[in-house]
Image (spheres, helix red, strand yellow):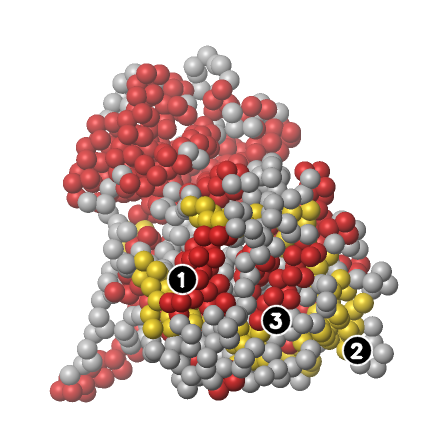
Amino acid sequence: MTATAPTLGLSLLGGAPDQTALIADGTRIDYAELRARVGRRRDELGDVRRLVMIAAGNAIEPIVTYLAALEGGHPVLLVSGDEDEAAAAAHRASLIARFDPDVVAHDGPSGWTIDERRAGSRHEFHPDLAVLSSTSGSTGSPKLVRLSAENVRSNAAAIAEYLQLTPADRAATTLPLQYCYGLSVVNSHLLSGASLLLTERSVADEEFWNRARTHGVTSFAGVPYTFELLEARGFDGGDLPSLRYLTQAGGRMAPDAVRRFAHLGRERGFELFVMYGQTEATARMAYLPPDLAMTHAGTIGLPIPGGAFRIDAVDGAESGELVYEGPNVMMGYAHGPDDFALGRTVTELRTGDVARLRTDGLYEIVGRMNRFVKVFGLRLDLDRVEHLLADEGIEVRAASADERLLLFATSERAAARARERAAALTGVPARVIGAYAVDEFPRTSNGKRDYAALVRFADVHDRTATTAAAGPATPAAVTPETVRELYAALLGKPDAGLDDSFAGLGGDSLSYVEVSLRLEDLVGTLPRDWPTRTPRELAAAAAPPQPPVADVEADAASARAAAAAAVQPWRRRLAWTRLETPVVLRAAAIFLIVATHADLFALKGGAHLVLAVAGCNLARFQLAPVAGAARLRRLGRSAAQLAVPAVLWIGAVALVTGQYAPTTVALVNNLVPGDGRWNEQWQFWFLEAMLWSFAGAAALFAVRRVERLERRAPFAFALVALAVALAARFAIAGPTAEYVERYSAPVVLWLVALGWLVARADTTAKRIVACVVAVAATFGFFGEPWREAVVAGGILALVWVRAIPLPRLAVPLVVTVAGASLFVYLTHWQVYPPFEQSAPWFGTLLSFAVGVVAYRLYVAAGARAVAGWARLRRAAAPLSLRLRRA
């Protein structure tokens, strides 16, 4: 079936011919050239109306194709053009299968490609139909929003009116083109004769700011997550002197964040527009005038020009469903191709949001209609559950599945507390409340809360726990999804993807233990570099499942299994397993340190060995090959995890006993001139050396060129770093370090660099080089052969032994000691001295007991502090804000 296109479709090009329209990769296109390109592409698409699917991107060709299709009267279906994202590719495939586009425009191997699936069209289109769009936040929606040309034009004009857009404005494309919010930025600016800087870069990327400054960008749009990135970056407006305004939509931003950015804008000369909208209303329905952002944060403000709200309340209630009317309200939904011919089926938009009209004339969202669920016969408002728990200082996300209430928090303690309080507050029995700890709360690609990911995470977590409780199962084929699910459950990452590695997800040396043990049960022997491999790669390398026992042996096998059944639990407890070598070395080294200090025996070298192990873990985890900004964040987090408990403990001891100087408390004793002799101020030299290592690595990788150089040649880079560190050692101490020289940070940093080199030695030849360097650098350092043998032997084990066999019964003890090693080291100086002469064995054991208890208390106190801070923030907010939608 075919339909002739109107002689003139919708044109969004409102600029003068010589004015700049688009800037991309250094190419500047004015409106005259853009009109010419659009005209040629319109001719290429033809005169017969066809459904044009565009794999979108913030680039010239997708935008030219979009504008040409609109002008030619062809209905446009925009989808993600990200070829590397499996979910996006699957979504495109499902839309092609369901809606059968006539033309697919995408970026191919030879550049931008227009694939004509047929000459005409098998669809019938309503004359007004212009754009088909997936609802925001959904990559698998079975329906599309039908938008008319008038919907698109009127909404672009309304946005341009309240933003007061002029040809002098230039926006950076910080949002995806297929997302209605991102598309509205393009539409409103081109209609106003303004210009666009086309970029796919994040606001966390320094190159984004370089280009924005170069091209005088006056605005950019963001979802709440964008503003979190800005705050993490330390954005103060000085990054972009030409900035006139920011816009925020795509989910509710916390009122205090709105006020912070509004205040910053007032100081720096830019405005903040907080906006509200849905795909069904083309993009925008409301905005908060910038002059009200400081005093009315948390409201959605006023309807856009040409639009109107009403509150559909029941029985005179103050709040009810928010209903919107305006020329931008969609024509209706398309569930299949037959719906393309439909005219308008809706005249107003029932938003699904619960709102109220305040006395000051502003509208405020207070809840969500579809967040009401039935659990154990009780009707619950999930938003209200989140608010009630937040009032008690417990930040959670609440969802529901299978008539269960699901609560998610960022720690095990908070999750357990949330279940207890939710049961008391709602009347729902605790047995039907699931509580889960996640590393962080996931968001959709549009920055909204991703409750669907949390529900999937709960399902995976429950199935994983059931499988573990049932014991070893019959081997089955390993898929990338099973590996991904394991990462999601064990690392608390609901949004872990098939292309995310353990290191990329933020795994560290202790989470490594549990994950590696579970992975080995799943896929068999793991390759040495598995932390940097994706679930796809690990599944591909997995050992195939063992074939079933042959029929002739079935009876004998069954008999053997039955005979072993009674003793199987005991054997399983006695079974041996392999524990990652750095963890075992860390536990063994802290034992050597404490036992030697307590005079249980004398075998030194443990602390220097731990420096090498720490350097190895530094390279494998904090400096894993992920984005540079992520490396810096991990280094900062690791430095804080080391420094905070150390300063608190040493400071407390100093206050009570006067034993330590302020420079020791501040971990800068290395900078204090001394007589070269050991004294108690040097007791924490190891921690100072590690902090210097974190600081040095951060300084190196803050330089982009250095960071790129290390990515290109990681082993050579580590070798050079070790050479520099060794040069510093020999320049300061000579071949043999004496007295406190062997503890000063500049002299021992070579051990950290040596561990770094070991981690980067991924071939036999490189491991041999690392071993030669380790032996040559270690022997002669102390002038004590046994001490040097401990260090060199541990490093050689680190190079060649991937994991060390241990009885399963010993694993919890070793892991606990390794995890608490920092606290054992901190506290043992005050624990063992009274027993050094009389009972060194007791002093040693007591040192470990105190250190482990201190570690547990510190973790618990940290969780309480986080909860208390959240409670204070809630208490400081006005009551009306605390009752709003999270």
Q: Residues within 10 Å of mark 2 (few under 14, many from 20)?
A: some
* Residue 274: % across, % down: 68, 56
Q: Residue at x 32, y 41 (%)?
A: 711
> Between 367 and 118, which is closer to the camera in this rendering?
118
Q: How far apart are the two marked residues, 1 and 2, measured between alpha carbons?
A: 52 Å
Q: Residue flagged by tag 3: what amino acid is it?
A: Glu
Q: Residue flagged by tag 1: what amino acid is it?
A: Arg
Above or below 567: residue 826: above
Q: Residue at x 42, y 33 (%)?
A: 703
The residue under label 3 is 150
* Residue 322: % across, % down: 73, 73
**What number is the disc on residue 40?**
1
> Image quarter for residue 241?
top right
Tell me which label, 2 or 3, sits earlier in the chain: 3
Q: Mark 1 or 3, which is nearer the eye? A: 1
Q: Residues within 10 Å of mark 3 (few under 14, many from 20)?
A: some
Q: Residue flagged by tag 2: what amino acid is it?
A: Ala
**What number is the disc on residue 546?**
none
* Residue 56: % across, % down: 44, 62
